[in-house]
Image (cartoon, rainbow, N blue to C red):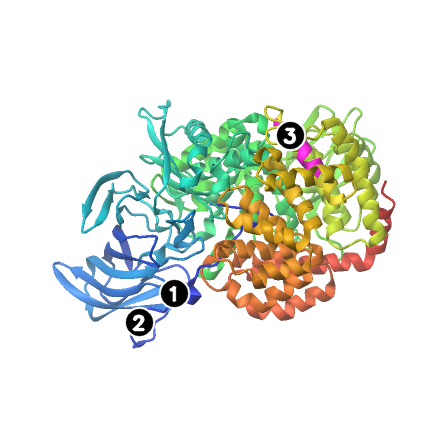
Amino acid sequence: MRLFPLTLALLLSCTAAQAQIAAAPQPAVETAIDVPKGILGNAVQPLSYRLDLTVDPSRERFSGKVEVGAVLERSSHSVILHGRDLAMHSAKAVIGGKSYAGMWREVDPTGVAELRFTQPLPAGPVTFAFDYDAPFYDGPSGMFRVNVGGDWYSWTQFESIDARAAFPSFDQPSFKTPFTVTLRTPPGLTAVSNTPEISKTLESGLEIHRFAPTLPLPTYLVAMMVGPFATLEGAVPPTPQRARPLPLRIVSTRQNADRLSFALQGSKEIVALLEDYFADAFPYPKLDQITSPIMPGAMENAGADLYNDSLIVLGENAPVRQQRRFGMVVSHELAHQWFGDLVTPRWWDDIWLNESFANWMGYRIGDAWKPRLNIRAGALAEGFAAMDTDALVAGRPIRQKIDTNAQIDSAFDGITYGKGGHVVAMIAAFMGDAKFRDGVHRYMAAHRYGNAASTDFFAAMAEAAGDPRIVPAMRSFTDQQGVPLLTFTRKGNRYTVTQSRYAYFGTASPDTRWGVPMCVRHAQEKQCTLLTEQSASFSFAGAGPLVPNAGGTGYYRFELPRRDWDALIEQADSLQGGEAQALADSLSASVLAGRSSVRQLAALARKLVHHADSYASDAATAALADLASAGLIAEKGERGWSRFRGTLHGPLLAGYGFDPRAGAYAGEDPEKTQRRAQIVERLMDSTRDKSLREQLLKAAGSYLDGDPAALDPVWFGPAFEAHLRQGGMTAAKALVGKALASEDPLFRPAALNAASATGNEEIARWLLDELNDTRLRPSEKHGLLTGIILTGETRDFGYAWLHDHLEELTSGSGGIFFSSRLPRLLGRFCSVERADTFASELRPRFAGKTGELELERVIERIRNCGRLREARGSEISREFARLK
Ligand SMILES: [Zn+2]
């Protein structure tokens, strides 16, 4: 699975509609039972499922007849399994031809259910048979439906624990069994599941789609999609690993029909690259790549991956960012067909074995797919961003014990993805590519179509590495939270390096020791060592600054003596891209720890702005922008910051040129196109470039008046923001109206996003309280709230609204997409008092719920920022005021 980052606000979503759903009739509670809050015991071993579901997306409910073949370990009156919001008509056990009627009741809001019998079931083989119906949700979890362009479609999204809202099940990743799926739909609809459709017949006015039995799968990877889909068919040609063509389809809602060929071609190429890496054929008999407009990211269902429209539907001359995301996310989801689907963690505490690896592979294979897009550099950017979270005292290690269902979704965070991916890259670089790949092959071969845990992975790596230090070093990063800080001191050419745990200004971190694979560079001379002691020394001959994170793949921050910082900053434009990103991260971390200055960070921004790598070129400017938007600086500081951006970026844009028309830069080097986009965004932020603003306003006007050639999608964000800042409420109403009438995967979210970020409280109020348009999806309403709270001028209004609507926002099962990430919206407040207020107002409301950890992180972040402002705010503000 891959979630969109929070800044893509409108694509972030959503709670299911459970609050409005009438509860199924429940038998009176007869006997108190010990409800398992997390992992189920071994009392029942499921062996196979037959799902026969009637799915008509135009109705509010679907129905199912489900049989689960299983073995009872011992005789019992009671079977514990999973189900949520299921209206059960009958539930029974069939043993040796004898039928036992059961009483179904749901005993926990996370979807734990009990099936109770009046007489004990004997141990041994059993078939459970269920007949039920259940609601479609309107947010992306369980079985959900959306009206797109007048047609109803339904999709499934089961990770982490939402399969239980679609069928009664033992909904836990350790249970891998074959599934035989039948879908009964209104005639003429397309039905898609994990395997090829083997027959289609008509019976009692319904079309019966029967699918081949699957290879062993856990419940969370099952998929069932129904609707009048458009499909583009093809095949991945044979490869050295696979003798036959692999059937491949792109499946999307009808209005996207003419924009599916990019995805077909790209998916073919990416499958072949992955088969080469794994030295193994694609593990399933076909692949469908399916899109839904409300999916807030992507999901790796075996042979039936699901994506947000914007990830798969790419028009001609798609923006560089969209192409990069396609390469990274498709590679990520398809890597999961091996890491996650073929070999599945036993329990959610090892989800890093899925996500950290898929993240690493996503960037690596994406980069191999189209090197011009520089996708690989995005992995480092994500890793350095994760350090900001990992540096807090509240937190979690990559690998963490999970006791309750409510904790599961919080494991899908920046630590698992960004840190996990970075740590995998670091270990792979240290072991060497060939040995690391050998370890991956051993691990896959030993657990094909089965389950595994971290210990299995570590054992495979230890065998492949031939270096006993690798596993303890890796575990020091997977099992401990925190970012190593390497502090370098110097005497002549001799350096001493000391490791500690990085801490923000005014805070103390627990004492922690890692096995750090450290690579340093002096000119062309590179030294790599595994730093296991607290301190070590090394020497360099020759001149040139010390580069403390050679290549940028090390998951650590560094601190330098003043003149070493200055020497490194002076040479920053000639560093490798990853090294430049590492420098910007460590220097801004040094500012936030109260050591380095804004002046040094600005000097770095001036150097890096000329860097050829678009991730490196903006890294220091982005760090300054974060400081400025955190509320650390006063008005004079704001003016200096605005002036600085104008001086820095104005002349650059003159060199690059600017033409907002669609396709104006088609065929250009993608890095150059991306640089221009960054520069325009920075200049528009600073409001200083009037002619740029005029050009964008004019182009937005023509575009909205019906000339699609007037504005390239890459400029939607800044152009619509300018349009709304000028046109106010009238323009906002018109733009939102156009957005809701459109299903364009780039225009609709960009327009709504711009409407949420105007900083105009009247517009914000209208969006949240008065806009009762049924075309506005619940996920989009959450997106509007996100934009309003992330924008400084409407932040307080947004928080007040959130405070009043919190229960409504966190009810339902959309934890993985919304509830667990909700507190993050508050991360841009900056004061000790605010931190205290949130602690007293929100802690009781999140206690024991998904989102609890995220709340602790955000409170700490706000308090740290407040402390820095109290102690050093005026000095930081003065430094910003002096920027030129
Ligand atoms: Zn994933």
Check disc 1 and report the residue beneath it.
36
* Residue 114 on image: x %, y %: 31, 67
Visible residue check, residue 358: yes
Q: For this view, does 560 lie left or right of residue 421?
A: right
* Residue at mark 1: C-beta within 8 A of ligand 1: no
Check disc 3 and report the residue beneath it.
673
Along the line of sight, the residue nearer the viewer: 73 or 880: 880
* Residue at mark 3: C-beta within 8 A of ligand 1: no
Q: Helix or strand or loop: what does disc 3 sit on?
A: helix
Along the line of sight, the residue nearer the viewer: 223 or 638: 638
Is 676 part of what is drawn in magenta? yes
Give the amino acid at mark 1.
Answer: Pro
N-term-proximal mark, 3 vs 1: 1
Q: Quadrant of residue 195?
A: top left
Along the line of sight, the residue nearer the viewer: 426 or 786: 786
Residue range corresponding to the magenta coloring: 670-680
Check disc 2 and report the residue beneath it.
25
